[in-house]
Image (tube, rainbow, N blue to C red):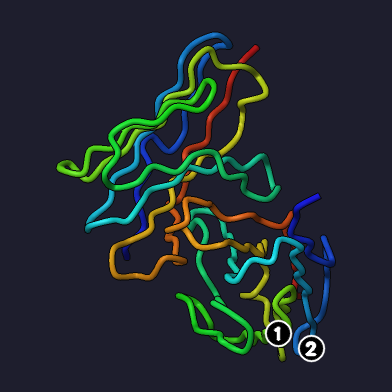
Amino acid sequence: EAQVTQNPRYLITVTGKKLTVTCSQNMNHEYMSWYRQDPGLGLRQIYYSMNVEVTDKGDVPEGYKVSRKEKRNFPLILESPSPNQTSLYFCASSYGTSSGYGYTFGSGTRLTVV
Amino acid sequence: SQQGEEDPQALSIQEGENATMNCSYKTSINNLQWYRQNSGRGLVHLILIRSNEREKHSGRLRVTLDTSKKSSSLLITASRAADTASYFCAISYSGAGSYQLTFGKGTKLSVIP
């Protein structure tokens, strides 16, 4: 089944404790992206990657890191999480919208930083 | 911000009625897409309409695009309780590259059985 898999689904952590949220897609998509979703603010892009070893900042990159060493994986790293990073996070992938395809989203990771 | 703006923010209708939600944007686009999100779940792609298209259909969904007014609408006909969800427009802006999408804040649709 074509899908984007995120792990974990839920995570509670303490301020300053490094964490990684994994994202993997099995559709050979070139493009992958991370979003965070907060009430009243919609989805905001954190980072994106157009191919292996190519990443770029989105609208809200502060406090996050990403890497794209393999085409299928795009982990999101929070080196020193803070409470304002409590949010619902989504990974998405795509062939590219000019191809006529939309994004495929993961099921989300609900992160709470205390 | 180049977010699309959905209208209304919330909509409540009876099962069997039609639901219409709108999206407005500010600059030239490559295409516009609509997504559905069930509570707390991942977004699901519904339909994509290109800038040179005016209308597209998919099952009970009809999307229109008016580039002169910089607006789009999503019509769900004969709504069902299972259509209860949030609906987002997402815009691929001209010059932003073929991958980039900017999402609006969504319309929350409630279909009452």
Residue A58 vs B35, above or below: the answer is below
Mark 2: few/some/many CA within 10 Å (<14, 14-19, 20+): few
Q: Which of A10 and A65 is in front in this view?
A: A65
Say which quadrant the N terminus of chain B sits in: bottom left
> Could you tell me which secondary element the residue under label 2 belongs to?
loop
Quarter where residue A89 is shown? bottom right
Residue contact at pointers 1 and 2, CB within 8 angstroms: yes
Residue B10 seen: yes
Q: In this view, does A17 lie to the left or right of A77?
A: right
Q: Mark 2 lies on which chain?
A: A
Q: Which amino acid does label 1 sit on?
A: Leu
Whether residue B80 sits left or right of residue A21 in the image: it is: left
Disc 1 marks which residue? A78
Residue B19 or B29: which is nearer the viewer? B29
- Res. A80 image quadrant: bottom right
The image shows residue A97 at horizontal and vertical percentages of 46, 58
> Tag 2: residue type?
Lys
Residue B26 location in percent, x, y? 23, 55
Label 2 belongs to which residue?
A18
In this view, B56 is above or below A87? above
Number of other residues with Cα within 10 Å of mark 1, as a class: few under 14, some 14 to 19, many 20 or more: some
Mark earlier in primary sequence (1, 2): 2
